[in-house]
Image (cartoon, rainbow, N blue to C red):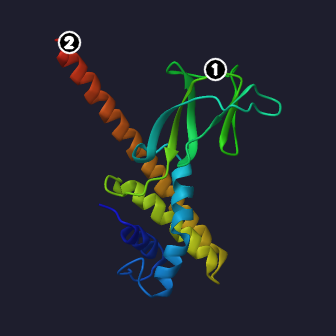
Amino acid sequence: MPSETSIANVAMRHLGENPISSIDENSDNARLCKKYFNDAKTTALEEYCWTWAKERAQLAADATAPAFGYDYRYLLPADCISPFWVGKNEVELKPTQPWVVNGDYILTDVEAPIQVVMTCQRSSYARMPQYVAEVIGAQLAVCIAQTRNGSDTSIDRMIAIYDRAVAMGKSKDRRKQNQVQEQQASGFETAMGVA
């Protein structure tokens, strides 16, 4: 099970540093990890609608309409990092039904309620897959590399590592989602006596 310290050690590994014992220890590397951890985590979770951080919500329209441009605004949950899907009656909004994120709100002309699939902050790492920990750790390495007086090539190298971690993580996450969908379909067929 990943932890803040194990994720920080992913960053240390990419940077060629010795591992830390705790993200709270009194060392320069631990302090840098702690300082940039939340920013790195948020950036990594904005990249994709990771299964581990995915939430669904039905939103009611706000009492105050937008000043102009759209008819309705919907307050996103406080822990929302990024909405990836907006729909109504379990159908994604069409291109003729545009929506935008404006601050803490989704603006659209679609009447309430709307449904949202989004990535949210998580405080527990209990069920975090290792591939998400690798993505967060790689982004943490980018943040730390940017604070050091090294060459641009070391920053570019960390960005390349991060990009590879994101690509691999997305691939693993999609496989995981497909396995779940296949199991659900198989379970449904068995329950219906089709299989």
Q: Is residue 97 above or below residue 28?
A: above
Q: Is residue 158 above or below residue 187?
A: below
- Residue 14: x and y in percent read 46, 72
- Residue 51: x and y in percent read 41, 43
- Residue 139: x and y in percent read 53, 63
- Please state which amino acid type lies under the numbered disc 1: Lys
What residue sits 26% from the left and 29% below the top? 183
Residue occupied by mark 2: 192
Q: Is residue 54 above or below residue 39?
A: above
What residue sits 56% from the left and 68% below the top? 142
User: What crowding class fits label 1: few (fewer than 14 Cα within 10 Å), some (14-19), or many (20 or more)?
Assistant: few
User: 70 left or right of 3?
Assistant: right
- Residue 32: x and y in percent read 53, 78
Q: What secondary structure is marked by label 1?
A: loop
Q: What secondary structure is marked by label 2?
A: loop
Residue occupied by mark 1: 94
What residue sits 66% from the left and 21% below the top? 110
Q: Quadrant of residue 4?
A: bottom left
Tell me the quarter of the image containing the C terminus. Answer: top left
What residue sits 46% from the left and 65% below the top? 137
Mark 1 touching mark 2, by CB under 8 A?
A: no
Find the distance from the CA under tag 1 to the CA under tag 2: 33 Å
Give residue 130's mark: none
- Please state which amino acid type lies under the numbered disc 2: Met
Seen from this angle, which residue lies furthest right? 68
